Amino acid sequence: MYLIAGLGNPTTKYEKTRHNVGFDAIDELAKTHNIDFDQKKHHAMCGKGMIAGQKVMLMKPLTYMNNSGEAIADAMNFYKLDPATQLLVIYDDISLEPGNIRIRKKGSAGGHNGIKDIIAMIGSQQFARIKIGVGEKPKNWDLADYVLGKFDKADRKLVDAAIEEALQAAQLIVGDDIEEAMNQFNAKKK
């Protein structure tokens, strides 16, 4: 089984914010693959189904962004999953422009508190991730205010297109072809 977790904050107050693009991507994956998000377990909303011939569990942690690792570690331990081959995390990245995605096999948290918590809770940096660009915060803005803010119409359109690319990349990654996903989507510049 493959665990695909999208990061975000679980209340309606945060819907469609920059920090919740991981949740948006999981919602689209669920819709595209007819996966019902009907289970509340592992401190998360979950749904099981099939993507690229693989059993998957889609997850939106209910622990808020900075404690995302609690939910992911709980599910990883319960199902005895290997992060290097059975975990994909989708989240926002301020170092990428809206409309861009970046795929990595492993790496540091890069200042992202949700990723930092996942690394601490599962004890590994070895897991696949898809970063969705939300753009750099404007000068003199507070970072929290920026990531918890909503996109303007033009950026939302770019981010929605990036989410579509993230879905295609996720299918390749789950189908055991992360190299192809990286080749296809990391080279794109907008």
Image: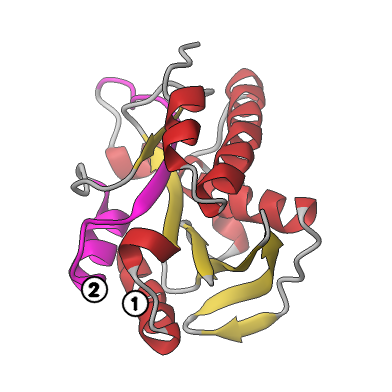
Give the mark nearest the N terminus, 1 or 2. Answer: 1
Q: Which residue is mark 1?
A: 73
From this viewpoint, is residue 15 visible?
no
| Amino acid residing under circle 1 | Ala
Residues in magenta, as a range: 112-139
Q: Position of residue 73 (x, y in %)?
A: 34, 77
Viewer-proximal residue, 73 or 141? 73
Picture layout, residue 52 above or below residue 42:
above
Q: Amino acid at mark 2?
A: Met
Residue 131 counted in the magenta span: yes
Q: How is the image coloured?
A: secondary structure
Give the residue at x 48% y 16%. 188
- Residue 36, by quadrant, is bottom right
In the rendered structure, find residue 121 and report the number of the disc placed on it: 2
The front one of 155 and 176 is 176
Q: Residue furthest right?
A: 34
Q: Is residue 185 left or right of residue 106?
A: right
Residue 140 shows up from this direction? yes
Q: Position of residue 163 (x, y in %)?
A: 61, 37
Residue 155's disc is: none
Secondary element at image label 1:
helix
